[in-house]
Image: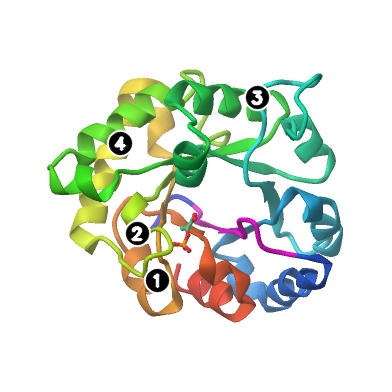
Amino acid sequence: TRNIRPLVAGNWKMNGLKADLAIAVEVAKGYDTALKAVVDLAVCPPATLLYTTTAALIGSRIATGGQDCSSNAGGAFTGEVSAAMLADSGASFAIVGHSERRTLHGETNAIVKAKAQAARDALLVPIICVGETKDEREAGKALAIVKKQLRGSVPEDSTAAGLVIAYEPVWAIGTGLTPTAADVAEMHEAIRTELGRLLGKGVAASVRLLYGGSVKPSNAAELMNVAHVDGALVGGASLKAEDFLAIARAC
Ligand code: PEP
């Protein structure tokens, strides 16, 4: 029994050429009435495909999102893509603070927060990613690290409908490893509690908390049935329409 409508979002990462629009089209074909009744879907292709993916999905009720956005509104920032540009390309969401951005591009909590704010200014819903490394988990610091990331990267005036959190343990991303259901339950409950401190309990109660990290059809049912898990952020498996749909069905 859920009181939050789940969201399954696909992060294509730096994969996808025009021909791969076929994946999105295939997902739309499989998003039937039964599935529409229970789960929201979003596809986050590379920025180059955002406009055409959104166009290909018109009428499907599947949303699109960017994988990152600039914290700046516009101007002399060569190579960056603004939140307004994502919105103009049809996006409803922007992933911010993905661990690959935090690790490979040095994004701090403060930068992630500024990006989340920029996304909201463009009327996008930020999907803010948090998660501990393997060392941090082994040192027993996972909860403390994630709470700190939340305090540093979630805008204080976020609304429930205007915010999605994705818990993605860094060591589970693209590795085939996943935390136990008990560890996910503990973390998601802690995230909800921390959001309550930051945003108020009423808001925190309805923010969607996604789990991400090696979600696939074979483990989706177990992970999606954990308390306070309101969907998934899916990397690798989102590039196969069948797998992505199977994960959605597991909600
Ligand atoms: C991700 O990068 O957001 C992710 C969850 O990747 P994967 O599903 O491939 O582990």
Instruction: Based on the picture, tell me whether residue 38 belongs to the magenta stretch.
Output: no
Q: Of callouts 1 and 4, which one flags the residue occurring earlier in the amino acid sequence?
A: 4
- x, y percent for residue 177: 31, 66
- x, y percent for residue 127: 54, 41
Q: Nearer the viewer, mark 1 or mark 4?
A: 4
Indicate the quadrant where residue 198 lies: top left
Disc 2 residue crowd, few under 14, some 14–19, many 20+, Cα 10 Å: some
Q: Which mark is residue 118?
A: 3
Q: Which mark is residue 146?
A: 4
Q: Amino acid at mark 4?
A: Val
| Residue at point 47%, 20% (across, down) | 110
| Residue at point 64%, 57% (across, down) | 14
Q: Amino acid at mark 3?
A: Ala
> Viewed as shown, does residue 51 lie left or right of 231?
right
Under circle 1, the secondary element is: helix
Q: Nearer the viewer, mark 2 or mark 1?
A: 2
Disc 1 residue crowd, few under 14, some 14–19, many 20+, Cα 10 Å: many
Q: Of callouts 2 and 1, which one flags the residue occurring earlier in the amino acid sequence?
A: 2
Question: How many callouts does the rendering have?
Answer: 4
Q: Which mark is residue 220?
A: 1
Q: Nearer the viewer, mark 2 or mark 4?
A: 2
Q: Are marks 2 and 4 in contact (CB under 8 Å)?
A: no
Q: Nearer the viewer, mark 2 or mark 3?
A: 2
**Residue 124 visible in the snapshot:** yes
Q: Is mark 2 within 8 Å of ligand 1?
A: yes
